[in-house]
Amino acid sequence: MIRAEKLTFDYAKTNEEGNVESWKRAIDGVDLEVRSGEFIAILGHNGSGKSTLAKHINAILLPTEGTLWVDGMDTKDEDKLWDIRQDAGMVFQNPDNQIIGTVVEEDVGFGPENLGVPTDEIWERVEESLKAVGMLKYRKHSPNRLSGGQKQRVAIAGVMAMHPRCIVLDEPTAMLDPHGRKSVIRTVQKLNREEKITVILITHYMEEVIEADRVIVMDDGKVVMQGTPREVFSQVDRLKELRLDVPQATLVAYELQKKGFPLRNGILSNEELVEELCQLKSKM
């Protein structure tokens, strides 16, 4: 679905007069493959290059060097731009930046309308998309009267209505409360499992990563770690070096291991931790 080969991107740093003073490398020779239907999480501290990478997948940014393909299409091919953006939809951190309609159903139908989809099909897509994200009963509501989590689900529905094969979510829960975060992540997981949509999730909330098929860790524009969540979060010391957190249950297990408790590596959830401790107690 997504393939990057030696992907590199430099951006200009300008002074107050707008003159270029220097160049900074934000993406540095990244090789990456994402298979159709995968749920990929990308982690990294601020400035690691993860959001810059996301914007390449939607062709918002184009490579300085190297190539990125979306469903076999080179993002540098201007003739394929709209096909790429239809295939790889983008959901940003602030849903208010994406929602433009005064009524939920009109906002969700805006994308398909711009694609020239026939009116009857637009309304079919609006209904199926709102139903998929659990927002169908709000179709006649004003987006301004929705909670942050509900707005973000409407933004996801708007992308879904364009029938993308891949959705890229750039820190979609950063501005939400814990309830809103859980609601949005459950929606994304459901779309991945039931609709087989490829998901690329950029986040700094480690608990959102546990259900991913694969985790990619970036630092200084490079991919420095990748593997299953269990494989990546087993390396607590390495993640600390990269200024990243781990799920709370993983950290507790890690601290207990340091105190001599023989717990297995890569515990990800509270349920796993409780089960492991109960097994340990039964052996004493």
Image: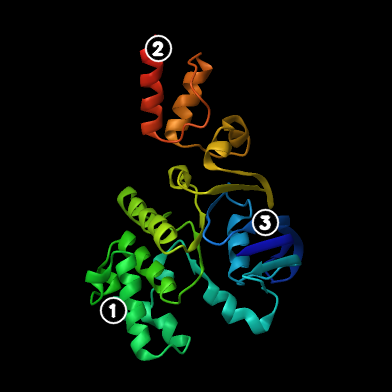
Task: Return the residue at label 3.
Answer: 32
Camera-side mark, 3 or 2 = 2
Classify 92 as above or below 278: below
Whether the residues at callouts 3 and 1 have beta carbons within 8 Å, the answer is: no
C-alpha gap between disc 1 and disc 2: 60 Å
Residue at the image point whose x is 28% and y is 62% from the top:
147
Residue 145 in sight here: yes
Classify 54 as above or below 227: below
C-alpha gap between disc 3 and disc 1: 39 Å
Task: Return the residue at label 1.
Answer: 103
Q: Secondary structure at mark 3?
A: strand
Q: Secondary structure at mark 1?
A: loop
Whether the residues at callouts 3 and 2 have beta carbons within 8 Å, the answer is: no
Which of the 4 image quarters holds residue 280?
A: top left
Residue at the image point whose x is 27% and y is 66% from the top:
146
Answer with left or right where residue 129 lies relative to residue 55.
left
Camera-side mark, 3 or 1 = 3
Classify 261 as above or below 164: above
Which of the 4 image quarters holds residue 271?
A: top left
Counting other residues with Cα less than 10 Å from the Cα at mark 1, is it few (<14), some (14-19), or many (20 or more)? some
Q: Quadrant of the C terminus?
A: top left
The amino acid type of the residue labelled 3 equals Leu
Along the polypeptide, which appears first: circle 3 or circle 1? Answer: 3
Query: Which residue occupies the foreground of this view, 115 or 194?
Result: 194
The amino acid type of the residue labelled 1 equals Val
